[in-house]
Image: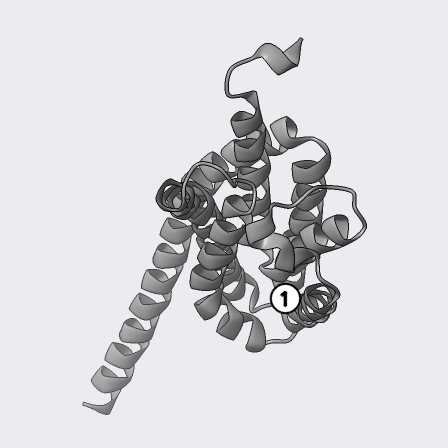
Amino acid sequence: MLDHIPYLPYLISAFIGIGLAAATGFRVFLPMFAVSLATYMGWIPMNENFHWLAGLPTLITTGIATVVEILAYYIPYVDHLLDTMSVPLATIAGSVMFASQFADIGTFPQWALALIAGGGTAAAISSGFAGTRAASTATTGGLGNSVVATTETAGAGIMSFLAIAAPLIAFIIAIILIVVVLVLGRKLWRKFRDFNSDRNSKIINVDAVETKNLE
């Protein structure tokens, strides 16, 4: 019955692509490893243009990169360094993941949709959590960063699984995540800005008192 629904394959591909793109917003390499593993094991098909994702070299490379990326986010200072690169890398990875789900719509529309939908989704989520980590560092001195890192890794794993096993659910969650990131991201940024303003004002007041005492 569902086979008679117009454009259903394209909708399913879009749901999978958005779900995987959202996963790359949490972690760049984990979704790629999940797709590579699923394709290598024959659990999901892959079009010819992205058959390299099903190769053993890609599986090993993305597996190693996944472990390194996950562990690196638990290292102070390194996590912030990765955040400076996470948004552009997530945008690229999200675009690739989205494009891998389409084969017969033409090269230009394929990559245009991939950049807008896939790259945009990944960039929104990645930038949101980068801001969360910055706010965590400012308010907890970095003690809460491990919680943020664990949440990101769990999010990447869950979204990767759902994108492959339940694309519609993954799509709905991805939309919710984008809305939450946009709303909470603004609140966290305001909190971070107010925190810095209060701290700077206290520093200025202390300097003013010291200067007065010297006079």
Query: Is 213 rendered above or below residue 133?
Result: below
The residue lying at 28 percent from left, 72 percent from top is: 205
Q: Is residue 153 visible?
A: no
Looking at the image, which is closer to me, 27 or 132?
27
- Which SS class for mark 1? loop
Number of dots carrying numbers: 1
Q: Is residue 101 visible?
A: yes
The residue lying at 45 percent from left, 60 percent from top is: 87
Q: Residues within 10 Å of mark 1 (few under 14, many from 20)?
A: few
On the image, the x and y values in percent for residue 57 come to 71, 69
Residue that mark 1 sits on: 143
Look at the image and tell me in which quarter the C terminus lies.
bottom left
Query: Is 111 rendered above or below residue 79?
Result: above
Looking at the image, which is closer to me, 71 or 112?
112
Residue type beneath disc 1 = Leu
**How did the renderer colour the structure?**
one colour
